[in-house]
Amino acid sequence: MRLSGRDLRCVRGGREVFAGLAFEASGGEALALVGHNGAGKTSLLRLIAGLLTPEAGTITLDGGEPDTPVAEQAHYLGHRDALKPSLSVGENLGFWRDFLGGERTDLSAGIKAVGLGHAAELPAAYLSAGQRRRLSIARLLVVRRPIWLLDEPTSALDVKGQELFVGLMQEHLARGGIIVAATHTPLGIPVREQRIGAAT
Ligand SMILES: Nc1ncnc2c1ncn2[C@@H]1O[C@H](COP(=O)(O)OP(=O)(O)OP(=O)(O)O)[C@@H](O)[C@H]1O
């Protein structure tokens, strides 16, 4: 499997963020997008996730589902944890599983995998920042998609949470998955760096 972008141009608020951008990531590989604040790392993740439309260029996934858009073969873990505060941890995860079209599998394994087994019944409104992030990460586990798009994924995670997430990323890569991450800090796994924008 290979995810690639060719000659991508991104414009936001009438301003060109980048142009002529190319990238490539193969199955089992993690690509770390690096660059200064405002260089366009989040914008590139959002282009791949189908949340922004490129002004030019193409994004393709060779070896994926040919009739399914790339965006629907990717998970996007953004800055904000999209949770419904009045729903419990388990209900939030169930909502996402159904929304993302996953099979109606047991959610408890996903909840336990991110260390939230003790909080499954708790409303999301009561979760700490790190717990919210853990719940968002559980989404990646309950619906399997080959591409993980991660925007500063370890922010808010404590050391234990970071170690746990490293293990989950390693498992994803070992299954032939692809990770593209925007990060200012090391991810904790081997990565290939892709610079966005000029070095400063
Ligand atoms: N909704 C928006 N409307 C207009 N411009 C935007 C919008 N969102 C982002 N931008 C601009 O697009 C540019 C790229 O932003 P982006 O968030 O992709 O950068 P980044 O490399 O992820 O930065 P950081 O390291 O600070 O997270 C910035 O100049 C930003 O101001």
Image (cartoon, rainbow, N blue to C red):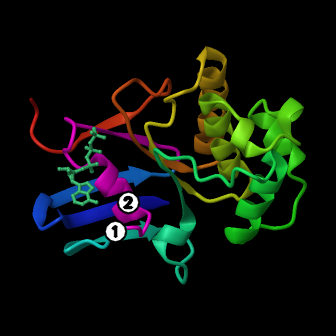
Q: Quadrant of the C terminus?
A: top left
Q: Is residue 30 magenta?
A: yes
The number of callouts visible is 2
Q: Position of residue 172 (x, y in %)?
A: 62, 44
Q: Residue 193 in the image: x percent, y percent? A: 30, 36
Q: Taking 107 as reference, is 29 left or right?
A: left
Q: Are marks 2 and 1 in contact (CB under 8 Å)?
A: yes
Residue for badge 1: 52
Residue 44, position in %: x, y? 31, 56
Amino acid type at circle 1 is Leu
Q: Identify the magenta region.
A: 28-51
Query: Residue, x 49% and y 23% (percent of image)?
Result: 188
- Residue at left 60%, top 32%? 129
Q: Answer with left or right where residue 113 lies relative to residue 180.
A: right
Image point (18%, 58%), residue name: 21
Disc on the earlier residue, 2 or 1: 2
Task: Establish if 140 lies above or below 48.
Answer: above
Mark 2 and ligand 1: say if the CB distance to the nearest ligand atom is below 8 Å. Answer: yes
Dot 2: element: helix
